Amino acid sequence: MPELPEVEIIRQYLDEQLPGRTIACVDILLPRQLKYPEPEAFQLLVAGKRMKGMRRRGKYLLLDLQDGSTIVFHLRMTGSLVYDPSGRQRDAYARMVFHLAGGGALVFADVRTFGCVYGFVAGEEIAVPGLQSLGPEPLSEAFTLAYLARAIRGRKQLIKSFLLDQRRIAGLGNIYADEALFLAGIHPRREAGSLTQAECKKLAAAIQRVLRDGLADGGTTFRNYRNGEGGYGHHQEHLCVYHRAGKPCPTCGRPIEKTTVGGRGTHYCPYCQH
């Protein structure tokens, strides 16, 4: 699933390419992935509208139109949002194609079809499940040691599950949660409320470090992630534990192990993460 670094990289590129361009029309190739409104209303909402810019909140992408309307994308596990300057390329998994006046297209593709698209007119509440309840952005000023210590205080929830709770920290997913816990030396099955102040400080710093490293490397691509140009990230070449079960820990050399925490595959070093 694209996580904060991957979604932010997509946002950055599209925010350079799309502002000022006009959506001529949209082909809705798989209507069930359009969650709101109905296809006919959505086509009327976007046709002939100029694009203002692309925002991100957690793992959501929000495309603002000049008239105040907003299109919301959630890529989920295998979705992508790619700008095709020629407008002629066709992704076999394209589910929605926004044709642009003067040429070019914005293509929403999704292999497993778990992604969602919403459209809201100006002044309408952006009622997307999960969007309004997101916690602070981990690379923002709101994400502080004080916030993290307060959020975990007294919680019996396992720390790995806590990190994946979008109501607590927006945009963090399986890859970067595993990497952050490794860097902080914290076992993924620790109860969140058991962390000391010193461990909280290490974890907060580790979360920000792994996200910045992911951004610097263009994101992580194992199978489906594509950036806004359709290219790949290469942060997978620099991961410490994620997707490395059985391989040597970069710190102690012992094998990385894989387990399941809260239904999610979890990679860790049992020696470095007590």
Image (spheres, rainbow, N blue to C red):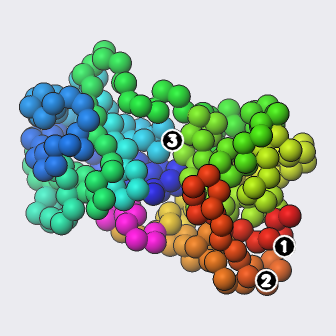
Residue drawn at the location 83% of the way across and 80% of the way down = 252
Measure the C-alpha gap from mark 3 to mark 1. 32 Å
Q: Is residue 134 left or right of residue 204?
A: left
The magenta segment is 221-230
Q: State whether residue 50 appears in this view.
A: yes
The amino acid marked with disc number 3 is Gly
- For label 1, the crowd category at 10 Å Cα-Cα, with few meaning under 14, some 14 to 19 and many 20 or more, is some
Residue at image mark 1:
271
N-term mark: 2 or 1: 2
x, y percent for residue 126: 36, 24
Residue at image mark 3:
58
Q: Are marks 2 and 1 in contact (CB under 8 Å)?
A: yes
Could you tell me how many numbered marks the image carries? 3
Q: Secondary structure at mark 3?
A: loop
Q: Secondary structure at mark 1?
A: loop
Callout in the foreground (3, 1): 1
N-term mark: 3 or 1: 3
Residue at image mark 2:
254
Q: State whether residue 54 appears in this view.
A: no
x, y percent for residue 267: 66, 68
Q: Main secondary structure of the magenta part?
A: loop
x, y percent for residue 166: 57, 39
Task: Pick whichever, 251 or 229, lies toward us.
Answer: 251
Q: Secondary structure at mark 2?
A: loop
